[in-house]
Structure formats: structure tokens, C-alpha cells
Image (spheres, rainbow, N blue to C red):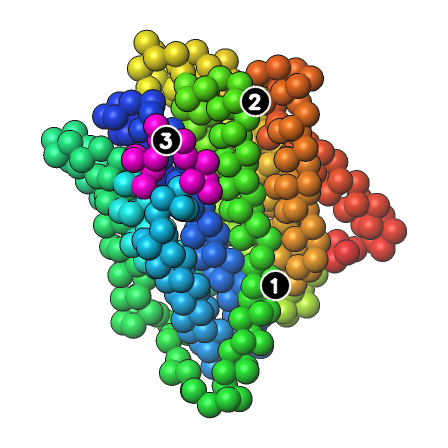
């Protein structure tokens, strides 16, 4: 998961130094589209993984194979639709995401070169979940590590020696996604154990079954899709707020936090999704004590990771910001001031994502979706609209931590109350 987010961070570092703050802001405008495509992949991946975990615990391998195949087929169709619209109407999409006249050329160039890799990004996201479930977590990791390393090399070559700017950074990401997607497909064709592609029938009954299973996958994985959409909402809303208060330099400063937030998300989501097959499998096998143990380990790990991330962002703010832009740029001072405030969110975010992942794992889709809506939209958007008026520029940076803290209070309060009343964690 960390290496998946590194793809975006590397783009930011090379674009920041190779093109400048305007290029950084242009990429940040299009970043929500990347998040949405990732969210669709993770939604189908987690939904299929949870259902397949339960089916494997019941020794129903055929059903697990069908679920896996359906997730790839339907997910690809959805991503292709988004890709076609983006390629046909790039200026419209960039405009809807907030691109100004100054940012439009860079934003459309990045979009045109990034979106062809979206189907392969979907393969990576789904494959990461199912390869791990198949008993090969190391190979699932390499499906992220290898593309990230290739992206580093290609980013440097295309942005600096070739001088392709934001278009080169996007093309490097696309090529790396293609390689990762091919690795996933190759695994399921030649190396998988219990999970393999299954030939789907085209009869009316089979189509109805596919639609029913797709709906259930979406229902279970929807919270993760919402998490990615919430990051998109955060970026889009934040871009408008920072643009209004601090201009393009403010957007460039905010974009650094936006590049770092997927890393924070990936670390937290990696904890939650690593626990998912353990919790789902034991949920299907009715081993409640193992579910409790896995949740406790996940929470302790999440809190530890959150504290480490907060410390790194607070103590290394100047070094981190300097990796993206020169200290001579006005955006540098904005980012160094705001990054420690933004860092407060890490611990609360990690706990929130762990609980959301837990509820997904036990098929409690309603709770996972509700808590994702709270942290990603219900608390976030009003905070973006009100805190800057109350606290000035600090309020803009504190919006995300406040939304996470409020969500944390709701989740923990409900969980403790239900646990005390029913004396079980399956609330």
C-alpha cells in the first residue's frame, strides 16, 4: 500500500523541481481522478476478498473463483467508461476538478497521459487483495514495489533529460501501472493456488448472478471507495479554499499535504486490510476469539504507526517540503507552517480506518459506510467552510484533523457502548 501511494509522491517531487509550483498545483488538480480510479479498484478488491475469504473458509473454491473473476470483469468495464470520458473531454474534466486558465494546460496534459493506465491500476488494486488471500502476500507486495521502482527511474528520465514536464510524469505512472497489472494477471494465470480465473457464462441466469454478486461486492467495499472519494473531496474543496485565501502558491503548498495524505492513508489502510483476510476467514468460521485478537493487534499497530507518522511530519517538515519545492518559493513557507498542523490527523485517521476495515471484514457494510461518510464528507466539508473563517489560514490546515477527531469520538463512543451492552465485539 505504501508503494502504491509512492507513485503519486514521486510525481510530486519530480514535478515540483522539474516544472515548479504551477506544475505541482496542476498535478494536484487531477489527483482526485487518480484517487477515484484507485478507490474503484480497492472497492472491488476488498469486496471480492471479503466474500472469497468466507467462501474459502467454507471450502467453496468454485464460488471464490467466480467472485474473483467477476470483480476483474465488472471493475474493468467501469474504469474503461471513466477513461473514455476523460480522453474525449479532458478540459471539461479538468475544469470540473477546479483547474484555472493558468493550470489548465498542465492539468489536461497530465490527465491525457495518466488515464490510459487506469485499467492496469485497477488490476493492481484488486490483485493486491486477492493474491494475498491466495497465500502469496510477498508477491502481492512486489506487484506494488516493482512498478514504484520503475516509476522512480522513468519519472527522472521523462521530467529532466527528456523535458516532458507533467506529461512525462503522468506517462511514467501509466507505464508503471501497466507493468504492475501484467504481474497480477500473470500470477493468476500461472502461479495461483486456490484462486484462478473462472470462465463466466453468458446466460441470463449467469448475468443476473453476476449483477447480484457485483452489488454485494460494492456494498462491502463501498466504504473504501468512499475513503478515496473523500480524499478527492478533500483535495477539490481544499484547492478552492487555499486558492481563495493564498492563491496558486497556497494550492501548491496544500498539494504537498495532498501528496503526503495518500501515504498516511496507505499505512493505515495496510494495517486494516492486512487484518481483513484474518478477520473475514475467522468470521466465516465463527472463531470469535481470533477476531478479537486480530482487532486488538490491528489497533495497537495503527496507533503506533500514526504516532510515528505525526512525529516525522512535525520534526521533518522543512526537509519534507524541500523534497518537493525550493525553499525560495513562497509556497515553501506556507507548507512548512501548515504541515505540523495537518500531521495531527495521523493517529486518529489510523484508528478510524482500522475500525472501518473491521466492519467491512464482518460484512457490517452500513457502519463502515456511515463512518466513512462522517470523516470524509459530513465533518470535512463544513469544517473547510467554517474553520478558515474562525481561525484564518490555520483553520484551513486544521480542517482534516478536526474531521478525523470528530469521527474518532463517534466511532469509539458507539463501539464502547455496544461492547459494554452486548459484551461482544460483533456489534
Confirm whether residue 307 shows in the render.
Answer: no
Task: Name which residue lies at 32% across and 62% down.
Answer: 184
Q: At x 15% / y 31%, what residue is drawn?
A: 163
SS for dot 3: loop
The residue under label 3 is 101
Identify the residue position indicated by label 2 in the image: 397
Q: Is residue 110 above or below residue 244?
A: below
Q: Is residue 383 magenta?
A: no
CB within 8 Å, label 1 to label 3: no
Q: Nearer the viewer, residue 228 or 130?
A: 228
The location of residue 345, given as percent across then percent down, is 59, 29
Label of residue 219 in the image: 1
Residue lying farthest to the top in this orientation: 328
Instruction: Single out the residue that lies furthest toward the left.
Output: 161
Query: Cα distance, mark 1 to mark 3?
Result: 39 Å
Q: Nearer the viewer, mark 2 or mark 3?
A: 3
Q: Give the CA distance from mark 2 to mark 1.
A: 32 Å
From which residue to which does the magenta span run? 95-108
Whichever of labels 1 and 3 marks the residue nearer the N terminus, that label is 3
Q: Residues within 10 Å of mark 3 (few under 14, many from 20)?
A: few
What is the CA distance from the residue labelled 2 to the residue labelled 3? 25 Å
**x, y percent for residue 225:** 53, 53
Residue 189: which disc?
none
Helix, strand or loop under label 2? helix
Of callouts 2 and 3, which one flags the residue occurring earlier in the amino acid sequence?
Answer: 3
Amino acid at each position: 500500500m505504501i508503494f502504491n501511494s509512492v507513485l503519486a509522491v514521486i510525481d510530486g517531487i519530480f514535478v515540483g523541481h522539474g516544472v515548479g509550483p504551477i506544475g505541482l498545483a496542476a498535478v494536484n488538480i487531477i489527483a482526485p481522478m487518480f484517487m477515484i480510479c484507485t478507490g474503484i479498484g480497492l472497492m472491488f478488491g476488498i469486496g471480492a476478498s471479503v466474500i472469497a475469504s468466507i467462501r474459502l473458509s467454507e471450502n467453496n473454491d468454485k464460488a471464490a473463483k467466480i467472485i474473483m473473476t467477476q470483480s476483474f470483469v465488472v471493475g474493468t468495464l467501469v474504469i474503461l467508461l471513466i477513461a473514455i470520458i476523460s480522453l474525449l473531454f479532458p478540459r471539461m474534466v479538468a475544469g470540473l476538478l477546479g483547474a484555472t486558465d493558468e493550470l489548465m494546460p498542465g492539468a489536461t496534459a497530465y490527465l491525457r497521459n495518466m488515464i490510459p493506465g487506469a485499467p492496469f491500476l485497477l488490476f493492481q488494486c484488486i490483485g493486491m487483495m486477492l493474491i494475498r488471500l491466495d497465500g502469496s502476500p510477498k508477491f502481492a507486495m512486489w506487484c506494488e514495489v516493482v512498478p514504484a521502482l520503475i516509476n522512480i527511474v522513468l519519472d527522472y528520465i521523462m521530467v529532466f533529460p527528456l523535458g516532458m514536464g507533467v506529461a512525462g510524469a503522468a506517462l511514467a505512472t501509466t507505464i508503471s501501472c501497466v507493468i504492475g497489472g501484467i504481474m497480477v494477471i500473470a500470477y493468476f494465470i500461472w502461479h495461483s493456488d486456490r484462486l484462478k480465473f473462472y470462465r463466466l457464462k453468458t446466460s441470463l441466469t449467469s448475468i443476473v448472478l453476476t449483477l447480484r454478486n457485483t452489488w454485494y461486492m460494492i456494498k462491502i467495499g463501498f466504504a473504501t471507495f468512499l475513503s478515496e472519494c473523500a480524499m478527492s473531496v478533500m483535495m477539490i474543496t481544499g484547492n478552492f479554499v487555499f486558492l481563495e485565501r493564498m492563491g496558486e502558491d497556497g494550492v501548491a503548498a496544500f498539494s504537498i499535504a495532498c501528496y503526503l495524505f495518500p501515504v498516511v492513508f496507505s499505512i493505515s489502510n495496510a494495517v486494516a486490510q492486512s487484518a481483513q483476510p484474518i478477520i473475514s476467514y475467522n468470521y466465516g468460521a465463527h472463531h470469535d476469539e481470533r477476531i478479537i485478537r486480530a482487532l486488538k493487534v490491528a489497533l495497537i499497530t495503527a496507533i503506533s504507526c500514526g504516532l510515528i507518522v505525526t512525529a516525522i511530519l512535525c520534526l521533518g517538515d522543512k526537509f519534507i517540503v524541500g523534497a518537493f519545492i525550493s525553499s525560495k518559493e513562497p509556497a515553501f513557507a506556507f507548507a512548512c507552517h501548515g504541515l505540523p498542523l495537518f500531521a495531527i490527523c495521523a493517529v486518529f485517521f489510523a484508528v478510524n480506518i482500522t475500525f472501518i476495515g473491521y466492519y467491512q471484514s464482518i460484512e457490517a457494510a452500513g457502519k463502515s459506510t456511515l463512518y466513512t461518510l462522517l470523516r470524509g464528507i459530513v465533518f470535512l466539508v463544513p469544517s473547510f467552510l467554517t474553520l478558515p473563517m474562525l481561525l484564518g489560514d490555520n483553520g484551513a490546515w486544521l480542517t482534516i484533523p478536526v474531521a478525523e477527531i470528530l469521527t474518532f469520538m463517534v466511532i469509539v463512543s458507539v463501539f464502547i457502548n455496544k461492547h459494554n451492552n452486548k459484551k461482544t465485539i460483533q456489534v
